[in-house]
Image: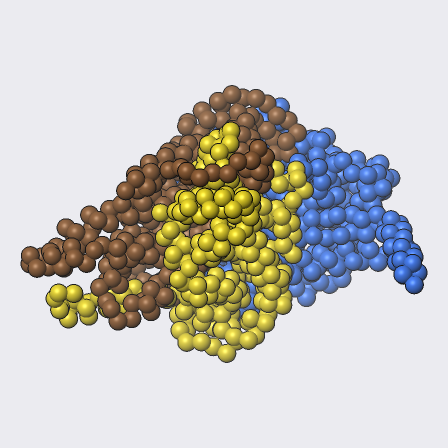
Chain colours: A brown, B blue, C yellow
Amino acid sequence: MEKRVVFRSAWLPYLLVAPQLAITVVFFFWPAAQAVWYSFQLQDAFGLKTQFVGLQNFAHLFRDHNYLESFKVTAMFSALVAFFGIAISLLLATMADRVLRGAMAYKTLLIWPYAVAPAIAGVLWAFLFAPSIGIVTYVLKGWGVDWNWIINGDQAMLLVVIASVWKEISYNFLFFLAGLQSIPKSLIEAAAIDGAGPARRFWTIAFPLLSPTTFFLLVVNIVYAFFDTFGVIDATTQGGPGQATNILVYKVYHDGVKAADLGGSSAQSVILMFIVIALTVVQFRFIERKVQY
Amino acid sequence: MKIKILAVALLSVGLTSTNAQAQTEIQWWHSMGGALGEKLNVLADKFNAGQKDYKVVTTYKGSYPESMTAAIAAFRAGSGPNLLQVFEVGTATMMAAKGAIVPVAQVMADAKEPFDPKAYLPTVTGYYSDLKGNMLSFPFNSSTVMFYINKDAFKKAGLDPNKAPKTWKEVLADAEKLKAAGQQCVYTTSWPSWTHIENFSAWHNVPIGTKQNGMGGLDTVFSINSPLHVRHIGMLSDMAKKGLFTYAGRTNQGDAKFSSGECAMFTGSAGAQAGIKKAGKVDWSINFIPYHDDVKGAPQNSIIGGASLWVMGGKKPAEYKGVAKFLAFLSRPEIQMEWHTGTGYVPITLASYELTRRSGFYDKNPGADMPVKQLTNKAPTANSKGLRFGNFVQGRTVIEEELEEVFSGKKDAKTALDDAVKRGNEILRQFEAANK
Amino acid sequence: MVENRPWLTVFSHAVLIIGAITIAFPLYVTFVASTLTLEQIMQVPMQLWPGDQLIANYTQVLTGGSTTGSKAAVSSMLVNSLVIALVIPLGKMAISVISAFAIVYFRFPLRMFFFWMIFVTLMLPVEVRIIPTFKVIADLGMLNTYAGLTVPLIASATATFLFRQFFMTIPDELAEAARVDGASPMRFFWDIVLPLSKTIMAALFVIQFIYGWNQYLWPLLITTDESMYTTVIGIKRMIVGSDAANEWNLIMATAILAMLPPALVVMLMQKWFVKGLVETEK
């Protein structure tokens, strides 16, 4: 896709891209290069002594059982967030697409959590589920559930998943709703005339037609779970108990900022960068295909 | 007209700037939030009012790890405070940063200010000195782990509220009775690693790590998987399974569980007293931490927690003079006593302890001297002087993670402590390599 | 619809109502907690109807923060949040719209290289390069400044991308006509391109406002000075910064204050927001 009509100037375009490039170089490329460089180094906390240690930081990481565990935790967490985030919002969007009355009101009531910062979402849910004063905890205890996410890893995971999903539902909901509304009514009516019930129509028409949206949301939700949920984790479990909710990005932060282990944290950053690049390539190929039709 | 105004403006700028120059500012970064922060500001104001050459400027920089991180970052960027309050687990990291800090002993000697390490409690001196006995940082707020009981809960369970359990055996026996009397949360703890690993080891005179708990060199390794450690953590794990021990979290979350009356027994910082008093919900007593009575020599003495002040390097000579003056001011017995009685932290010089005792404070506040008594229970040994492990912020996280694995029933005590030692030693080796 | 299934409509409404209530529940509890005293909150179970401490709690946080944790006043945090939430979208749009214009309407050496340079930043979320970026900011003396809080977040590929996509849809005839009239590229940019982009800018503004307002990790790292805290950071500081129990009533009041502005922006500018969201990402 190229414009036929273009302007000519020897300097103007450079001037126009300069601000963005400057910021990109200073705050993206330079730090990224530094991260790579630090990942080969061993430094003390104050940066007084620096040694080049080659791949030792990486070797360390892959020998570290807990780092590998963090991969598993991250995978589990992202899968849960993406699955529930998508499933719940698809259900809500399908229902919202059906109703004529009050559709706008429902939409307004369902989209506002998008505006809530992940850290605040974490605080809200941590308060509801607080082991001694939480109102939900109280109900759960009434049902005989021994609720204490401070020590129960599965419950801690459940808590951060709920908080993360809650915040992400509105985003997914909007995309599904837009997707559903763009399905030609004639298709659905034709199926209805053929005698297909609502459930069948959903699975044979709407769901397949939504698959590009679903796939897109899958990638977006995984990226969300990987990075944006930092606030949720930091405001609630801080990676614990044990390693139960220590996702990769939280570990980078903890090791680099709190534990002042620059080399180890940078090595983790480099590995994360590769993961993001892989995800972006997947996403980009998808965008390309969309652009083509 | 305009020129006149300009001249006046210039003049006043000139005046204020000479005023400012006359006073040397001493930047002090600290982590004392809330009421403690107010008390700290009172100290600084007093110093500022007492002389006019120096002005101590205090800045609250968040929690201990946060202010340390901020100072490290500031140092890397070529700035930072004159004085930095660092918590005890950061001691080894600060100590190893030779170019970044100036030993307190040296600062005081250079400024010819009086300074006698022997004036401090031995457990305090030991913690912050090198092997030659030079004080490297200035002890400021020290506390230790104490054992608290809720007397009302004891009464309700038919136990003698004035007889707090002394040994873990007694704790277990009382715990069963409290549970039987319907107590939901029987025992909880704040700071699990500091309490059940670090202070536990000192109290039973067993090493946390080799080389005098790391004080003797960077090539130290952890020894917290000894049979005694395994037995103790295993006991806690059994208590957790029986509903006798409720885990509260890695920091001071246990405090609120006790002060609200939810839990009947509790181990936490001596500093927790202020919060319990403020909440005013329970009738409580403060006691020595329990011990296993079949361990020879137990109880030994407990070790401190809290923070000390580090003098940062790369500043102007005049500023060091001011820092020395300020530290000399802080070591005065009456100032120490004010800080001790106002905050609940331990009196760290023998003189201020004496002064406080003579003032009758302990008669009016029974139990307020328990922490000092526990810290000085016996002359400290190599196992109970303190500890000095590199990157112990990370090391403590590892220990806490492994303890959580035990309390949640995922690992048995032996496996978890073996893993803690293995992972902890990796961190120590990394620190050793980085600070060769 | 060709058919009428009343039970299905009822079912749909039921699902939506349950969904909306479940989603709103945490918000409601937060609001109730912000109108109670700390003692009332500590009473298990907490009451679920508002108390009478609304004014007291909000006055307290707006003027003095919490009493045990950070004492920074939330009103100044709200100002900080607002500055950041305005500077980020405006700055982002400013630099993106001109770079997209250059990339679409000019042919020049290294054009595609620049385009890829910008695109590739999609792959480097701030979370993966926190430490070195922090160092860059520290080296530039930008810790605890608005510049440090905003500038690194201004560059982003998404806005440039969106403008590029949009410019592609502007009919070539417009540019052709401008050129025939002898208009300079910048004249064309000001008179034709910018007015046409209004809709898309409004949409971008809403999304980036929320993005800016909700920043967490970055301000957490580079603000150590209480006067520079944002509201979201302020909440976090109230939670860890104390020896006593958290003052949940004040924390919850602050949470409401922190949620209100972006939630209002989303609800009031719903049309732009939805359009922006769905189009930005597609």
Percent position (x, y) of residue B267? Answer: 51, 53
Q: Describe residue B92's horizontal placement relative to residue A202 as left or right.
A: right
Q: Quadrant of residue A43?
A: top right
Percent position (x, y) of residue A158? Answer: 34, 52
Q: Describe residue C87's horizontal placement relative to residue B60 as left or right.
A: left
Residue at image position (46%, 26%) is: A58
Q: Describe residue B351's horizontal placement relative to residue C128 as left or right.
A: right
| Residue C266 higher or lower than B20, as above or below | below
Q: Which residue is farthest bottom? A: C52
Percent position (x, y) of residue C97? Answer: 51, 46
Task: Say which of B224 and C40 sits in front.
Answer: C40
Q: Describe residue C168's horizontal placement relative to residue A39 as left or right.
A: left
Percent position (x, y) of residue C237? Answer: 56, 56
| Residue B249 higher or lower than A22, as above or below | below
Residue C215 showing in the rendered view: no
Residue at image position (13%, 69%) is: C4
Task: Say which of A125 and B332 sits in front.
Answer: A125
| Residue C10 higher or lower than C217, as above or below | below
Q: Quadrant of residue B279?
A: bottom right
Task: Say which of B1 and B348 sits in front.
Answer: B1
| Residue B227 higher or lower than C81, as above or below | above
